[in-house]
Amino acid sequence: MSVVKRLILAVAVTGACVAGPGSAVATGTGTVVPSTAQRTAILKAFGAPRAGWRCLTVRLAASDHRYATVRPPTSKGCLRWAFNGTNVLKRTSGNRWKVLFEGSAHACPLTRIPRQVQRDLRVCP
């Protein structure tokens, strides 16, 4: 293994260890993975039945972790929980999450949601 590849691997492993289990982890797509507590609170606010939680993907905007999205499942075993459209949730001052936007046909940019958050969550380009 070359020195460069070993260095990249070491940085990746170190970053994963430093992040720890309770913190958000970057996914490289403008979003980060929420902590377990954040994910639970977001799915409750989204209104998804607990039985479908394992099938849904939750992501936080990399630019502002107060904003999140819930994405539909992609595996065949989870099609029961599929939905069409996009959504944006925001953590309020009381540390509660609320749905700011849900829709499948909308004009961009959306008001009340920062432009970079819209790009991070792939709501508006």
Image (cartoon, grey):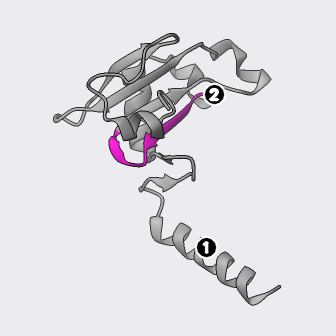
The residue to which callout 1 is attached is 13
Disc sitting over residue 55 in the figure: 2
Q: Is residue 63 magenta?
A: yes
Q: Position of residue 4 (x, y in %)?
A: 71, 84
Q: Is residue 94 left or right of residue 71?
A: left
Depth check, front residue: 68 or 43: 68
Kindly report the distance in space between the C-alpha atoms of the residues bearing marks 1 and 2.
27 Å
Quadrant hosting residue 11: bottom right
Residue type at mark 2 is Cys
Q: In the displayed image of the protein, which residue is found farthest to the left?
A: 93
Q: Position of residue 22 (x, y in %)?
A: 42, 56
Q: Position of residue 48 (x, y in %)?
A: 49, 18
Disc sitting over residue 67 in the figure: none
Quadrant hosting residue 91: top left
Depth check, front residue: 118 or 94: 118
Question: Which residues lie in the magenta part?
Answer: 56-66
Q: State the SS at label 2.
A: helix
- Residue drawn at point x = 35 percent, y = 22 percent: 110
Q: Position of residue 47 (x, y in %)?
A: 43, 16
Q: State the SS at label 1.
A: helix
- Residue drawn at point x = 51 percent, y = 32 percent: 122
Task: Please identify the dominant SS of the magenta region.
Answer: strand
- Residue drawn at point x = 51 percent, y = 10 percent: 105
From what the image shows, is residue 35 above or below residue 46? below
From what the image shows, is residue 92 above or below residue 61? above
Question: Where, quadrant-wise, is the N terminus in this rendering?
Answer: bottom right
